[in-house]
Image (cartoon, rainbow, N blue to C red):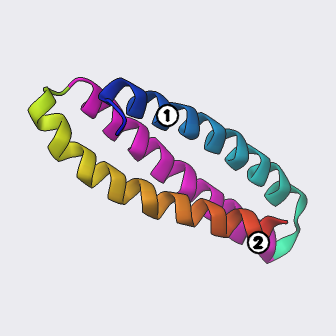
């Protein structure tokens, strides 16, 4: 079982990695034309917004007490899993 600092570090690293992937997807969306460009740009922007929400939630967790952290972690993990799935789906469609 990971401790609090390890978990937070792992999540921060993954968020940075996803940020780079989202930037790559945004560049590919910019190269598309017409409706495809608009559709993919919107999808990437939505994912970036969700990523920003996760970063904010993680920041709240980092400043919380140990007791509150355990409670916040459950909600964060659910949002994390959903976001991860969305990124992987989008990534597979961009290739």
Dot 2 falls on a residue whose secondary structure is helix
Residue shown at 80% from the left, 66% from the top = 94
Residue 78: quadrant of the picture: bottom left
Q: Which residue is mark 2?
A: 93
Q: Which residues are magenta?
A: 35-63
Q: Is residue 61 magenta?
A: yes
Q: Quadrant of the C terminus?
A: bottom right
Residue shown at 56% from the left, 56% from the top = 47
Residue 88: quadrant of the picture: bottom right
Q: Is residue 8 magenta?
A: no
Q: Is residue 8 left or right of residue 95?
A: left
User: Would residue 42 be visible to someone looking at this image?
Assistant: no
- Percent from the top left, x then y, of residue 27? 82, 49
- Percent from the top left, x then y, of residue 72? 21, 44
Q: Which residue is mark 1?
A: 10
Residue shown at 32% from the left, 30% from the top = 3
From mark 2 to mark 1, how far is it between C-alphas? 26 Å
Dot 2, how many residues are within 10 Å of its Cα: few (below 14), some (14-19), or many (20+)? few
């Amino acid at each position: 079982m990971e401790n609090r600092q390890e978990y937070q570090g792992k999540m921060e690293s993954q968020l940075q990695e996803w940020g780079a992937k989202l930037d790559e997807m945004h560049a590919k969306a910019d190269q598309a034309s017409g409706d495809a460009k608009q559709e993919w740009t919107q999808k990437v922007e939505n994912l970036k917004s969700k990523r920003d929400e996760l970063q904010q939630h993680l920041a709240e967790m980092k400043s919380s007490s140990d007791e509150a952290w355990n409670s916040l972690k459950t909600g964060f993990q659910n949002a994390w899993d959903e976001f991860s799935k969305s990124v992987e789906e989008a990534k597979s469609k961009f290739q």
